[in-house]
Image (cartoon, rainbow, N blue to C red):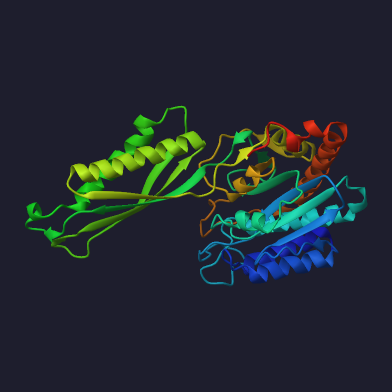
Amino acid sequence: MSIDDTIQTLFLELHQNPELSNQEFETTKRIRSYLEKAGIRILELGAKTGVIAEVGQGSPVLAIRADIDALPIDEQAECDYRSKNNQAMHACGHDVHTSILMGAAYLLKAQEQDLQGTVRFLFQPAEENFNGALELIDVGALNGVDAIFGLHNNPALTINQMTSCAGPFSANVDRIEITVTGVGAHAARPEAGVDPIVIGAQIVTAIQTIVSRSISGLDAAVVSITKFLAGNTWNVIPETVEMEGTVRTLTPQVREQVKTTLKTIVENIAAGMGGKGELRWFDGPPSVINVASWVELAKKVAQQVGYEVIDVEPSLGGEDFAHYLHHVPGAFLNLGSQSDYALHHPKFKIDRDMIMPAANYWFELAKAALTTLHSSLNSNPKNSPENSSEKNH
């Protein structure tokens, strides 16, 4: 069976048998089986789910990551390989990412003796929960790694298109919870209480001024309230309102500015109207910060293997690949998957013809990156990419 046939088969198996974040036990077994068939060594580092494997020997070490988890969505896509699992679907294309990385692993294994170092494959769990990267880092997946690459499919691009950019590529993704406490009362006698619904509505309106009036027009930020719960009947003013939402920013400075302003708005509006407001902030993954030199290499190799390179602005979507870039330099990029539906949509369906060309691209990029690392390390270790001022801390 050809490598193309092998990874197409893997894709179908993964798509039909999706597993949610931190539950990827059968997926892990399947990935291990495919790696073992090719004689690719697996590193036993103690991860509960996910697989870490290598080809090549010695230094430098390049890591390539693919995510493996699915989403809690019932699939509605029209295809003969739909998910067999209720409330589980690869609606973000992680099955594609895994198949692409497996193809690259097979191609690199075939040329293992010629590699100028080691390529480490990170088949990462729980990207959708934003904790999978941290779990692999904790077990030592980045030990000895000099640079790292990751990708995500982009349904808005055709399968011959690639995009990335230096600097911020995705957003800081934070979750917020707001509790407004008033004094319950009969709806016919609101003056006897403190209405948290009115306070909450004022807070929601005021929050919209954070981006429009507190943040520079040159900086990107989004503050969205997505959940507003209050009361349980028609004639009683409740005591509390519960809200949830998300904040998206590109830089640490704007992130902190939004947090401070949001806290001030919540607490002061509530207090000014006789109630109490509490903000709870939950840090999500930070922004993906790509290193310029690695982005340029990724674009150069993409053009060499036939991709059209598309210029792109940073996205306010989230990606836990950012955690890796706080330890080693690297780049994250998008490859076109040409779907009529967006990521996370129940009818999302990629063009499977993207898989083998993408695997070949990873193969060529890995070789080029190893050559770059090898040359830099041998010529002047102090000037190697992993020791340069572009490294993220």
Apparent side of residue 56 relative to residue 214 in the rendered image (left or right) = right
What percent of the width, then of the height, locates residue 228? 30, 54
Q: Residue furthest front?
A: 382
Q: Quadrant of residue 41?
A: bottom right
Q: Which of 235 and 244 lies nearest the eye of the viewer?
A: 244
Apparent side of residue 278 relative to residue 75 in the rendered image (left or right) = left
What percent of the width, then of the height, locates residue 38? 84, 63
Residue at position x 77%, y 53% in the image: 120
Apparent side of residue 356 relative to residue 272 in the rendered image (left or right) = right
What percent of the width, then of the height, locates residue 303? 75, 36
What percent of the width, then of the height, locates residue 237? 16, 58
Residue 370 can be seen in this image: yes
Q: Is residue 25 above or below residue 300?
A: below
Apparent side of residue 231 relative to residue 298 in the rendered image (left or right) = left
Residue 334 can be seen in this image: no
Q: Is residue 304 above or below residue 245?
A: above
Q: Which of 236 and 180 lies nearest the eye of the viewer?
A: 180
Q: Quadrant of the N terminus?
A: bottom right
Q: Quadrant of residue 231?
A: bottom left
Please give the count of numbered marks on the rendered protein: 0
Q: Is residue 130 above or below residue 223?
A: below
Q: Quadrant of the C terminus?
A: top right
Residue at position x 46%, y 35% in the image: 254
